[in-house]
């Protein structure tokens, strides 16, 4: 599609930059040209669509670097769930029962609703981590279909674990590898998913390492989210969980280490030496009461995810900033802007194109904001406006891969029936949980 966005004020948060009214020409899924009064110059090219963004700001789309779309239908869940007094109890009583209750239909609607709400919040890319033990083979394709329906960009994987038996472990590895080899598109890529070191034997880590080598991708795994994972690894293997991953050659520049709340100083060195990314999930960490990662500024590569609590990166980044102040770290707004921006660096490694800036040659993943700033907005304070003023309520139009997927706060298709069908799937799934 040849798309022209007219008179938008370009706003970039890292590095901080505000530009005056600019026309942006998009062609072949990328930003092709920027300038003033481009419409007449492009008359010979032919324009499929023109958006007049006068008085609006335009930003690179936000990236959610870790999510669980399979949990979207857990909102307000009513089911026979026992009291959970610690992190492992939460997993056993809720999440490991909910994921087993998912089937093809409920997983699709989980993915569909989560994708719709990601786009509405100004998130153009989501790195997802799925678990559906009763429906492993083909599950990534179902989520891919949900992403495609909405036009959302993503990186998908299936969570490999030993907890449901070695047969299902092997199915999970096969699901990851085959999706990468067969199902990838210009909009959807795959990584190699795994649950956490405390549910994976050394044999399983060896098989995962082989999958990473075969696919030339990275592992996407939760690590020391809770102290249990740390103590388990030392008790059973005599080393930290991060060291175990390094031992099995599972750390590289495409690796996504999720949470890392209780990593050790030597783990920081290992992650930095391997160029792996640690993905910080502020709201989830607070919700599960697992603690706070005080080593964020020692890590070279920190990104931000939600761990399944929506995909609103405006909100998630604010929580991260405020929690850092509460924890005594007092990081600057620019620190969290860099964390959020790093999601684009992950996308570049998987998609082999440039993300995260409004410049010629970069991916046309953009968000138009209707933001009326009551104070001056300038190069030195964009982070302050992001954290204390902007929100997903300002999202008006979303463009992904050069396509307008959400315009004037509406999708190009009817969504009310999708939400109604999702409610039916949620009710059915909640009842099914009692069987596990």
Image: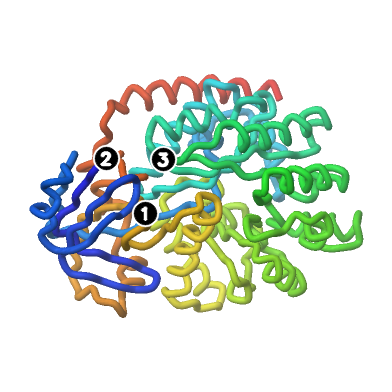
Q: Which residue is labeled 1 in the image? A: 61
Residue for point 72% across, 44% down:
214
Foreground of the two, 182 or 322: 182
Residue at mark 2: 1
The number of discs equals 3
The residue carrying pointer 1 sits among few (fewer than 14), some (14 to 19) or many (20 or more) residues within 10 Å by Cα, namely many
- In which quarter of the view is residue 118 placed? top left
Q: Is residue 160 left or right of residue 183?
A: right
In the image, residue 315 lies at what x, y percent? 41, 57
For the residue pair 413 and 356, the one nearer the viewer reads as 356
Instruction: Give me the C-alpha separation between circle 1 and circle 3.
Output: 11 Å
Q: Secondary structure at mark 3?
A: loop
Q: Outermost residue toward the left?
A: 40
| Mark 2–mark 1 CB contact (< 8 Å) | no
Residue 152, which numbered label? 3
Q: Secondary structure at mark 2?
A: loop
N-term-proximal mark, 2 vs 3: 2
Neighbour class for label 2 at 10 Å: few (<14), some, many (≥20)?
some
Q: On the rendered image, what quadrant is the C terminus found in?
A: top right
């Amino acid at each position: 599609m040849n798309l022209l966005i007219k008179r938008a004020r370009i706003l970039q948060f890292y590095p901080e930059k505000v530009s005056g009214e600019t026309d942006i020409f998009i062609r072949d899924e990328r930003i092709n040209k920027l300038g003033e009064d481009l419409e007449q110059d492009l008359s010979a090219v032919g324009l499929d669509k023109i958006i007049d963004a006068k008085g609006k700001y335009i930003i690179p789309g936000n990236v959610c670097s870790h999510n669980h779309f399979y949990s979207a239908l857990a909102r307000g869940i009513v089911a026979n769930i026992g009291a959970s007094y610690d992190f492992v109890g939460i997993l056993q009583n809720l999440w490991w029962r909910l994921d087993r209750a998912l089937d093809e239909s409920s997983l699709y609607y989980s993915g569909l609703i989560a994708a719709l709400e990601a786009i509405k919040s100004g998130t153009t890319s989501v790195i997802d981590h799925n678990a559906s033990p009763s429906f492993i083979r083909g599950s990534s394709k179902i989520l891919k279909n949900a992403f495609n329906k909405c036009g959302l960009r993503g990186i998908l994987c299936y969570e490999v674990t030993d907890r449901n038996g070695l047969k299902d472990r092997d199915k999970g590895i096969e699901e990851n590898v085959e999706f990468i080899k067969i199902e990838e598109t210009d909009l959807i890529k795959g990584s190699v998913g795994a649950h956490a070191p405390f549910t994976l034997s050394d044999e399983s880590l060896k098989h995962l390492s082989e999958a990473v080598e075969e696919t030339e991708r990275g592992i996407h795994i939760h690590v020391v989210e809770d102290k249990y994972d740390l103590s388990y690894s030392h008790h059973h293997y005599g080393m930290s969980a991060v060291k175990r991953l390094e031992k099995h050659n599972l750390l590289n520049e495409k690796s996504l280490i999720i949470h890392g709340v209780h990593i050790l100083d030597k783990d920081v060195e290992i992650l930095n030496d391997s160029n792996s990314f640690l993905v910080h999930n502020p709201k989830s960490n607070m919700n599960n009461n697992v603690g706070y990662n005080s080593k964020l500024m020692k890590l070279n590569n920190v990104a931000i995810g939600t761990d399944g609590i929506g995909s609103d990166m405006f909100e998630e980044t604010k929580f991260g900033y405020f929690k850092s102040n509460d924890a005594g770290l007092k990081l600057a707004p620019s620190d969290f802007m860099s964390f959020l921006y790093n999601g684009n660096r992950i996308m570049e490694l998987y998609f082999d194109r440039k993300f995260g800036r409004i410049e010629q040659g970069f991916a046309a993943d953009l968000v138009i904001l209707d933001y009326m700033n009551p104070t001056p907005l300038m190069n030195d304070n964009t982070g302050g406006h992001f954290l204390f003023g902007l929100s997903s309520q300002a999202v008006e139009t979303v463009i992904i891969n050069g396509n307008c997927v959400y315009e004037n706060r509406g999708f190009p298709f009817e969504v009310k029936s999708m939400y109604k069908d999702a409610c039916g799937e949620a009710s059915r799934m909640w009842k099914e949980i009692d069987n596990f």
